[in-house]
Amino acid sequence: MISTKKIKDIPSNTVFFIPDYQRGYKWTALEVSQLITDLFEFEQKTNNNLNQSYCLQPIVLKKMQASDTRLLNIVDHSVTPEFQYFELIDGQQRLTTLFLLITFLNNRFKEEFINDKFQIIYKTRSKSYKYLTKLSEQGLSEEVKNLSKDNIDFHHIYEAYNTIHNYFNQKDKRVDINLFESVLMFRSQLIWYEIDDEDNVDAYKVFSRLNSGKIQLTNADLIKALFLGNFSDTIETTVEKRNIALEWEQIETMFNDDEFWFFLNGSSNDELHRISFLLNHFASSNNDYDLSLSDPKFSFLVFNEKLKIEKIKDVWQKLKEEFRLFYNWYKDDELYHNIGFLLSDYVQYDFSELISQVKKSTDSKSFKESIIELIDEKINVASISDLYYKKDFELIRRILLWVNILHINQNSNLNYRFSFYRFSSQKYDVEHIKSLDSDITKSTQSQRHFLSSIFKAYNDKSFEECQTEEDVTEGEFEDVLKDIFHFLNKGQQPFISVLEKIKNKFHIQDPDIQLEEEHGIGNLCLLDRSTNRGYKNDIFPLKRQTIIDQDLGGQFVLPLTKSAFLKQFTNATTSPLIWSKNDMNSYLNYLKSQITQSL
């Protein structure tokens, strides 16, 4: 559970338990002074606006029962049910510094005027609790100073407290300690990440993962806590907080829609919190604080800085405007297809560059024109007839994807949009429409698969169901099927001779097609990877039937691929058993016309 908690709202009966797996307090004068300076700068930037809060980085904790045996034998601390105990998994340095700051502030007054202050106890460094108590009672006394020489933990605690004392007692600079106290206690808050006890999570494992970089807290979690916890307690802000919570949920729901997500993220890995895509983009565009992009908490740090100086509702409004931009792209069919193409795995256009096109464009029309220009740059080829399978593989992939998208746009009877989700999740390969002989003959396994597929397609029984050649179906193809049976049964027929008989009988080869044309784009299409492994070496009619069966069965088949195998681009009627030169040229001409008309 993640929430925010103002420093003043941490009850005095709260006890933080530092387990034995944690190191001691190590903050130096630099970190302590920087925290105090940051709080003063925050107050100056916000002009004492009580609706804005300074957010410290998170602490991670887990509630403990007073009966926990680890609380036994803590020096000078009596465990009683009136205390609320928390195992502090991460955040000891921040919390100890806060303790020292409150201690310093309290030491100015009599007991009835002091701020409530939590306690910190230690499993293995039990004397540290006693030292903190003595520091609270005596401040920078000689005894406290002398004790700091006996123990490295005492030394760091003493130096931090002394840094605080010196900061507020500078001779040449007046420091308003009362103003600082107000900012610290009433306008500063911690991101409070409490691990649910019911989850039965081992605290040490959480600590190990936090400190190995495998942090459980995502930037999305932390940023959400900033927005929802950074409010003063009034009716107006409570309503505003609820509205933000509702709108956050609506935006998150939209990002969890696979069609929306893969439209924007065709070339990216999935994320635990998909809304991070929006948050990361916004943070990158608003990094006015010289924060490092390589910092794992980068987006959180940007929002944290921004919310120190801007109103929550203003920052939230800007974030919503970014989301609306993406959403409007998604709802506009033209932009959906064109931008989806650019962001796909085949193109991987830089998203920040896409945003720069928005800023350069004067209106929607000019933006759409600029997107077409970007696509033209990615499919810049003098003649697609000269493209060759291996040499121009990446460009061929892009062209085939682009024409698939155009094919949907220009066919009104196709009552759907191109699905970047299905395209990304199924994965596609560039494959030959008419299989190459070299693919069929390159291994015994591919030979057997090829012959088994033909036997199954033209015989009443599959090869596995046949015991003798008498099980071969009588008729036009009987002789060839018997040869296939004998090859598959005991290898009694040479494969090459069987292959020649198949070519002659089924007319699967057009002698007019040259070798270089077989590797040209006129004989290439996109086939989904999993299915392609199963039928890539099959003859054309078997591939064709497989695609028809998939389409009838409700499986997503790319529209251009389906139209090619159904020969919808060929004017003259040709045999469904062969991919002829006429079919190839008709398909190639269609590709050319689509590229020419669209770009």
Image (cartoon, rainbow, N blue to C red):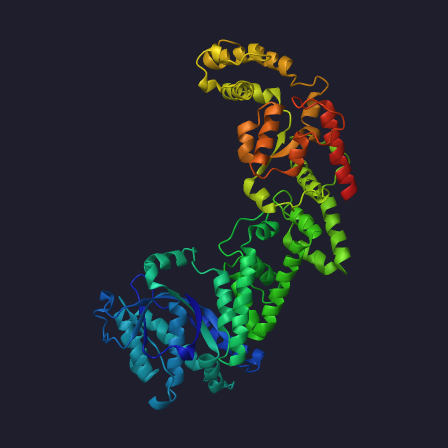
In the image, what residue occupies the spot 55% across and 81% down? 49
Q: Is residue 210 left or right of residue 388?
A: left
Q: Is residue 581 left or right of residue 85?
A: right
Residue 251, position as x, y percentages in the image: 56, 61
Classify 391 as above or below 319.
above
In the image, what residue occupies the spot 57% across and 59% down? 280
The residue nearer to you, when weighing 332 against 216, is: 332
Residue 114, position as x, y percentages in the image: 37, 86
Residue 407, position as x, y percentages in the image: 70, 40
For residue 43, say whether it is visible: yes
Picture quarter with the N terminus: bottom left
**Number of numbered discs visible in the structure rendering:** 0
Residue 300, position as x, y percentages in the image: 52, 64
For residue 167, say whether it is visible: no
In the image, what residue occupies the spot 76% across and 52% down? 369
**In the rendered image, which quarter is residue 499 located in?**
top right
Classify 52 as above or below 461.
below
The residue nearer to you, when weighing 204 against 51, is: 51
The residue nearer to you, when weighing 295 against 276, is: 276
Picture quarter with the C terminus: top right
